[in-house]
Image (cartoon, grey):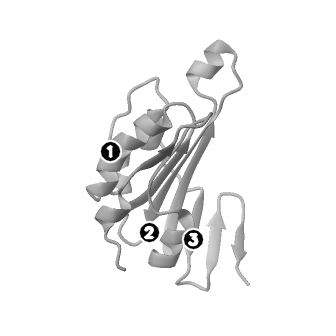
């Protein structure tokens, strides 16, 4: 059964504590399909938690096809994740690129603005060049 980008762009959420939301491909699926993938990750304490003294954190991930710059997956764990992912799903379904995300002005101070301010890839996976995996901290070659 063939899955199109429209099938992949169906967002889903788990209304747990903290809530989780996602749209598109997982990192593993993107690597399998595209080979060359850039992964952008943010893990931070949102302003609401900082001001209230709560220990809550937010984790966000954007998965990008390195060849086309198209955003193929977005994942979030933290407050308001389902609401934020619902809006991000429009961008993923429309085929927006990472450059489109970067050119968007975020609403400050919100957690959602982090999706448009992640500028540096956390990991760059390149299957086409001897399965080299790069990260901010190290370069390792898969065996």
Measured Cα–Cα span from mark 1 to mark 2: 18 Å
The image shows residue 102 at horizontal and vertical percentages of 38, 46
Identify which residue is drawn at 64% across, 72% down.
133
Ranked by sequence position, the earlier of labels 3 and 2 is: 2
Residue 125: which disc?
3
View extreme (left): residue: 94
Residue 103: which disc?
1
Residue underneath mark 2: 66
When asked about the image quadrant of residue 115, the answer is: top left
**The C terminus: image quadrant:** bottom right
Q: Nearer the viewer, residue 96 or 73?
A: 73
Instruction: Tell me whether circle 3 and circle 2 mark residues in contact (CB < 8 Å).
Output: yes
The image shows residue 135 at horizontal and vertical percentages of 65, 62
Identify which residue is drawn at 70% across, 79% down.
141
Of helix, strand and loop, which one carries label 3?
A: strand
Ranked by sequence position, the earlier of labels 3 and 1 is: 1
């Amino acid at each position: 059964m063939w899955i199109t980008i429209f099938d992949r762009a169906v967002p889903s959420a788990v209304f747990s504590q903290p809530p989780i939301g996602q749209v598109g491909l997982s990192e593993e699926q993107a690597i399998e399909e595209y080979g060359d993938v850039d992964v952008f990750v943010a893990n931070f304490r949102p302003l609401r938690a900082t001001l209230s003294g709560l220990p809550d954190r937010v984790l966000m991930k954007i998965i990008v096809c390195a060849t086309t710059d198209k955003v193929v997956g977005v994942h979030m764990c933290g407050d308001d994740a389902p609401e934020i992912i619902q809006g991000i799903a429009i961008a993923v379904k429309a085929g927006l690129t990472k450059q489109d995300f970067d050119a968007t002005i975020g609403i400050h101070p919100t957690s959602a603005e982090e999706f448009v301010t992640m500028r540096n890839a956390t990991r760059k996976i390149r299957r086409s060049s001897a399965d080299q995996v790069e990260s901010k901290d190290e370069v390792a070659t898969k065996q």
